[in-house]
Image (cartoon, rainbow, N blue to C red):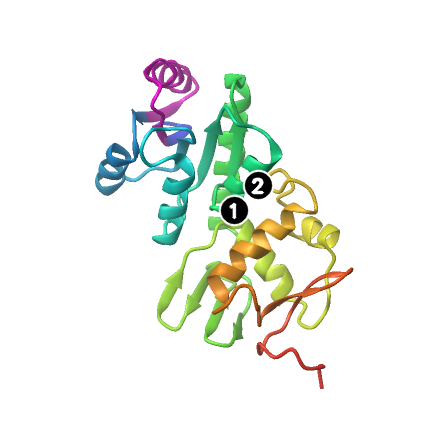
Amino acid sequence: MAEGGKLLLVDDDPRLRNMLVRYLEGQGFAIHAVGDGVQMDRHLEREHYDLLLLDVLMPGEDGFAICRRLRDGGSGLPIIMLTARGDLPDRVKGLEVGADDYLPKPFEPRELVARIRAVLRRAAENVTVAPAPGNIAFGPFNLALDTRVLWRGDQRLALTDTEFSLLHALASHPWQPLSRDRLLNMTHDQEEIPGPRGIDVFVSRLRRILEEDPAQPRYLQTVWGRGYVFVPDGDDRERP
């Protein structure tokens, strides 16, 4: 196995694919490169990868659609999106569909390597984190702190590292409103979240996982002017 990890690159530009393959192999990574989501699916079915580099602007199924499809299918594979559209709304959209990081083109290859290593490091730290005692149960859900897995009955629900950290932070402080700034500090993933308002993106992602109606949340409720509050029994009445 390559020292740096095994990567899969999806980009429809053959020149960029060839350049990145040569450069990343020189940095100690094993990397395969394909031109679209169909080829990507074939590789993911056959082999294990540590991280996916995913272009956004591709003909047919674009990177946003691919990322959302993978996350909806339960994949927790770390994803860095690459795109020529680097403005904030597109970066937020990338995070909304489940990306772990978002790098606008053109970029310095050294920056890409730094971001790859940062995402892989976070993933490895969360896999090897020391077991935490107990679980947090609410409604039909069980948040297993030792394995960092969310369960709904017998169904395992995929969470990214930041989604787990944010849900853990909220669920550890039931009925206590937490500001965006405090939640940002508690997740320890400031590099991934674009400022305190980026917390809103991840709360929205969690609501799509937890809530029957994300527009009328039961568990992750908004406290206007203060932030968010976790209501463990899904009841918005005053705490007894």
Asked which secondary structure carries label 1, the reply is helix
Quick check: 182 left or right of 4?
Answer: right
Magenta region, residue range: 7-31
Residue 65, compared with residue 148, is above or below; it is: above
- The N terminus sits in image quarter: top left
Residue located at (53% from left, 61% from top): 207
Mark 1 and mark 2 in contact? Answer it, CB < 8 Å: yes
The answer to whether residue 131 is visible is: no
Residue at 69% over, 54% down: 183
Residue matched to label 2: 92
* Figure quadrant of the C terminus: bottom right
Q: Residues within 10 Å of mark 1 (few under 14, many from 20)?
A: many
Left or right: 169 as drawn, with respect to 159: right
Residue 124 located within the stretch drawn in magenta? no
> Residue 3, labelled with which disc?
none
The extreme right residue here reads: 225
Residue type at mark 2 is: Val
At a point 63% along the width and 73% down the height, the residue shown is: 231
Q: Nearer the viewer, residue 98 or 166?
A: 98
Q: In the rendered image, which quarter is residue 193 located in?
A: top right
Expressed as whole percent of the image width and height from the top left, the position of residue 85 reads 52, 27
Q: Position of residue 173 (x, y in %)?
A: 68, 68
Other residues around mark 2 within 10 Å, as few (<14) / some (14–19) / many (≥20): many
Q: Secondary structure at mark 2?
A: helix
Q: Residue at x 39, y 42 (%)?
A: 65
Q: Nearer the viewer, residue 36 or 21?
A: 36
> Distance between the Cα atoms at labels 1 and 2?
6 Å
- Give coordinates of residue 140: x percent, y percent: 46, 75
Write down the residue under mark 1: 96
Kindly identify the amino acid type of the residue bearing the numbered disc 1.
Answer: Glu
Residue 222 lies, with reference to residue 103, above or below; the image says: below
